[in-house]
Amino acid sequence: MTTFHIITLFPNAFDSYLGESILKRAIEDKKIKVKFYNPRDFVDNKWHRVDQRPYGGGPGMVIEALPVIKAIERATQKAKVKIIFFIPSGKQLTNTYADKVSKACTDIILVCGRYEGIDARVKKVFKMEEISVGPFVLTGGELPAMIVIDSISRRIPGVLGDINSLEESRVASSDVYTRPEIFEYKGKKYRVPKILLSGHRAKIEQWKKKR
């Protein structure tokens, strides 16, 4: 079973996505497991505060290093893990990377930043891979973590049910169709492409490649 260890200030942000569809079933079937570690649980102050103003000035707040370090330490107590740190300038997440991680690791720690980021000294304590899910900046690392969980989980045997559902491993068009063959909307008829109704497998595959 693959276990995802999530370091986040907002664990409830994952409830909806993990509680539906394929990932929910994967958790119930014990194909994957998701555990949360909130840095707020590793501080002594009564406000559970984990952020401070940045040295050198600048807007916003920075998450302190020690609460994050302690959270990661808790996650690594019983496992040899891969630690992924989300950062816009990191290595681009790809299907190839997700496939490699799914086969090589059973325990994956995903470190989700917030505000202006996490004190960079965390990366001096632990060996991490800096990963980006795209050329843009998000409010926090929770969405990237969900993307990584999804992209890795769907490669784990049994999660998709039928391995042929892994689109990137087969010829698949970005356009798909289902019944009815023809429907009408505002006086105009919309039809399924004739090639898909032909039953000619080779020509259908060629059509998909072109799409």
Image (cartoon, rainbow, N blue to C red):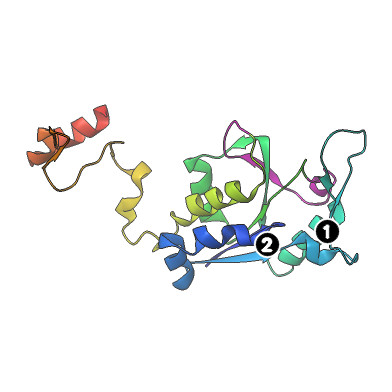
Give yes or no for residue 132 being in the magenta stretch. Answer: yes
Looking at the rendered structure, the secondary structure element under dot 2 is loop
Helix, strand or loop under label 1: helix
In reply to whether residue 98 is colored magenta, the answer given is no
Residue at image point 34% right, 45% down: 167
The disc, 2 or 1, on the residue closer to the chain's N-terminal end is 1
Percent across and percent down for residue 181 are 11, 43
Q: CA distance from mark 2 to mark 1?
A: 20 Å
Q: Amino acid at mark 2?
A: Lys
Residue at label 1? 67
Q: Which residues are magenta?
A: 118-136
Q: Which residue is mark 2?
A: 80
The vertical placement of 81 against 120, above or below, is: below
Disc 1 marks a residue whose amino acid type is Pro
Q: Crowdedness of circle 2 by 10 Å Cα count: few (<14), some, many (20+)?
A: few
Image marks 2 and 1: residues in contact by CB distance under 8 Å: no
Hey, which residue is sitting farthest front in the picture? 186
Q: Quadrant where the C terminus lies?
A: top left
